[in-house]
Amino acid sequence: MKEALRLAIVVCIMLFWLQSAPAQQDTQTPGYHQWWRDRPFGRPFNSRDAKKLPLISVKGNKFVDPNGATILFRGLSISDPDKVEHQGHWNKAHFEHVKELGTMVVRIPVHPVAWRERTPPEYLKLLDQAVQWCTDLGMYIIIDWHSIGNLKMELFQDPMYDTTQKETFQFWRTIAQHFRGCNTIAFYELFNEPTIYSGQLGTMSWSEWRKLNEDMIALIRAFDTETIPLVAGLDWAYDLTPLLIEPIQAEGIAYVTHPYAHKRSKPWEPKWDENFGFAAGRWPVVATEFGLFVRRGEDVKNNEYGKAIITYLEGKGISWLGWVYDPEWGPNLLQSWDTYELTGGGEFFKVAMQGKLGD
């Protein structure tokens, strides 16, 4: 009787333990997260064409090819690959249209919200395709972390730009690890447009912005020592005057300005000299973004601001890119996705990229 009672107690204890114990997971079931097998998703980009285009580097205040020849880049920004893919136009033909305009370099804006929602591994697949298509077509690439706001305080202009310092650092860690050794990607634009928006996005000094960029550059170069980091000025990437006192402590980099027409009033040239043109005498500078609207019926070659800014930039040896090859974002260079017909602004940049403004 005592043995039976003892056995019954043991059975009850075992049943209680089995009911309260965590269920045994089937680690072979698809979708089960074996966290101990996790690895970084920035695997190296694998392409036999990674070295097909000549490597671009910095020499003094110029971009040069392996023979030491100076390169002045003319190009444009497309819209976010996630947007283009969702709208059914992410294909090689899209880049062939871009190439037909005379484009030397394509800026690819990666919005933080798209990077997260698509997931980094899936977004990298889009970038891999862009790299292969641009390589085939002989165009270089700028990868741009397309946020607007105050990275120090993590306050941003619109929800699509929301990010964190950690996500920004991880983005560049992933990109640099994945694309190191790929000559087609000539530039990493570290942050699109830093701004405190007249205090509405908090405070951030140039010294604080400088430190964030130096940290990003050091992180990138732990993986990739060849791709050129691009550092934006303050005031929505327009103002480079702090370089007179505190330049970035890193070699082989370039600086960014976004000289939109509304930034300064006429006469423009003396203000451009003061705000960013002076920097081109010491470092490479790239106007990675600006656009314009051309009035219906206007001769695109005679657009006053467009002709003035292109003449000024090229006179200073500053490379430039027009914004934006999309029919919805503005200033838009396309009329529609259906026809790929250019707007007046698109026609202007086509003429400028082909070096025909003076014809």
Image (tube, rainbow, N blue to C red):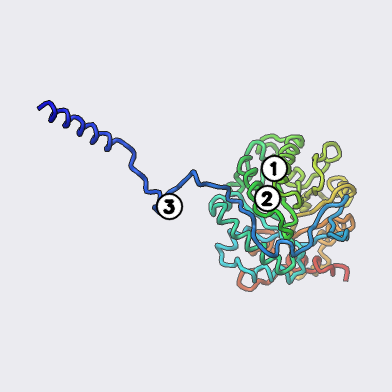
Toward the viewer: 319 or 298?
Answer: 319
Q: Can residue 76 be seen in the rendering of this structure? A: no
Give the mark, 3 or 2, whose residue is nearer the N terminus: 3
Q: Is residue 122 left or right of residue 303?
A: left
| Residue contact at pointers 1 and 3, CB within 8 angstroms | no
Disc 1 element: helix
Give the mark, 2 or 1, whose residue is nearer the N terminus: 2
Q: Which residue is mark 1?
A: 219
Looking at the image, which residue sits at the far top?
A: 2
| Image quadrant assignment for residue 359 | bottom right
* Dot 2 amino acid type: Ala
Give the mark, 1 or 3, whose residue is nearer the N terminus: 3
Q: Position of residue 226 (x, y in %)?
A: 76, 52
Residue 176 has which mark? 2
Q: Is residue 300 left or right of residue 175?
A: right
Q: Which residue is mark 3?
A: 31
Is the N terminus in the top left, top right, bottom left or bottom right quadrant? top left
| Image quadrant assignment for residue 241 | top right
Compared to 358, does 258 lie above or below?
Answer: above
Looking at the image, which residue sits at the far bottom?
A: 339
| Image quadrant assignment for residue 334 | bottom right
Q: Tell me the crowding category of disc 2: few under 14, some 14 to 19, or many 20 or more residues within 10 angstroms, Cα based.
A: many
Disc 3 element: loop
Real-space Cα separation, disc 2 to disc 1, in angstroms: 9 Å
Disc 2 element: helix
Q: Is residue 163 left or right of residue 224?
A: left
Q: Tell me the crowding category of disc 3: few under 14, some 14 to 19, or many 20 or more residues within 10 angstroms, Cα based.
A: few
What residue do we see at 61% from left, 53% from top?
Answer: 43
Toward the viewer: 138 or 105?
Answer: 138
| Residue contact at pointers 2 and 1, CB within 8 angstroms | yes
